[in-house]
Image (spheres, helix red, strand yellow):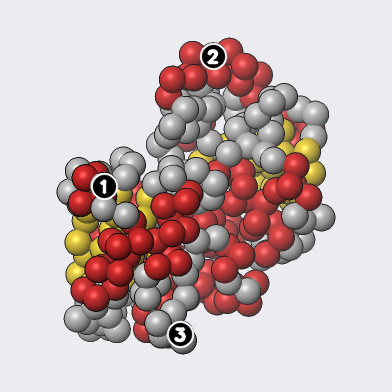
Amino acid sequence: MSSTKRNFLSLLDCSPEELSHLVERAKTLKQNRDWEFRPLRGRTAVLILALHSTRTRVAFETGMNQLGGHTIVLNADDTQLGRGEPIEDTARVLSEMVDIAIIRTLNQEDMESLAASASIPVINAMSSQLHPCQLLADVQTFEELRGPIGGRTVAFVGDGYNMCNSYINAARQWGFNLKIASPSGYEPSPEMVASTDNATLVESPREAVEGADLVVTDVWSSMGHEAQAEQRRAIFAPYQVNEALLDHAPEQTLFMHCLPAHRGEEISPTLLEDPRSAVWQEAGNRLHSQKALLEFLLAEQ
């Protein structure tokens, strides 16, 4: 195994300085579109998608192409994993053929086993616990519009699931204050909250957004929770982020959502078009931040 192999399963796999470098590099790649810059020429990524994907897949495929590389996409039914091949064996085979593996799965153990057995870098393209690639784009977007995020206040309203967990890690790494408002029984784990002094649970969405520079939410029924959708709609209804809730935040507050959004559920039907919404810039920045990550793991290392 190469001594320079690095994984990106969590924001905690990088130092705060490396994360800041990734965000700055993403901004540079976005501004300087040099089509002759091909640092990953001849490199191949495999994108393993056990779950549906739009932004993640398009960003990684486009990013590899723009950097001179190639991507092989393996959907749930495309591999021998579905016929019982251990993921550790798949990891060893892929390590002989490609340069980096990117995986999206709800099975956290599969992701960790792939990373442990592969001699190539592995990227978490979303798991049941974390979504670190999204946070690179979110921080990039905030800093493009409002400057450094360190020392600022972020409100997360909704399900204490993978996006919330990654915001907790981000608060720790970038040094911002995170206020979390979740229904009882749907908060992030006590261990996650206790992992940093920067995250606090609050009583209500209004308390969360008051004084916040950024307000974030996610769907009420993430992938894997579809069977609970009707029950969750009733429980989460008071946690909808809408224009009236944002009116309790400062005038310059931004709103973000990792998408896809369920209009009329976790957000009001018109919130994505509100001037305070940065979701389209946020979505577009998935390309640039993931290009920076690919370059960091394959070229800089």
Q: Which residue is pictured at 73% across the width and 47% down the height?
A: 191
**Label 3 crowding class (10 Å Cα cut-off): few <14, some 14-19, many 20+?**
few
Query: How far across and down, in percent of the image, does residue 273 sit?
Result: 46, 35
Query: In this picture, is 14 found above or below 104?
Result: below
Label 1 vs 2, first from the N-terminus:
1
Q: Amino acid at mark 1?
A: Gly
Q: Is residue 129 visible?
A: yes
Answer few, some or many: residues within 10 Å of disc 2's Cα (few below 14, many 20 plus, some between 14 and 19).
few
Q: Which mark is residue 84?
A: 1
Residue at the disc numbered 3: 4
Tag 3's secondary structure?
A: loop
In the depicted view, which residue is nearer to us: 120 or 197? 120
Q: Is residue 160 left or right of residue 96?
A: right
Left or right side of 70 for 271: right
Q: Is residue 191 above or below residue 32?
A: above
Q: Residue 167: x percent and y percent?
A: 63, 50
Residue at image mark 2: 231
SS at mark 1 in the image: loop
Q: Mark 1 to mark 2: distance in Å?
A: 34 Å
CB under 8 Å between discs 1 and 3: no
Q: Residue at x 76, y 27 (%)?
A: 204
Quadrant housing residue 170: bottom right
Q: Which mark is residue 243?
A: none
Q: Rate crowding at label 1 as few (under 14), some (14 to 19) or many (20 or more) other CA atoms within 10 Å.
A: few
Residue type for callout 2: Gln
Q: What residue is rendered at 41% in x and 85% in y?
A: 2
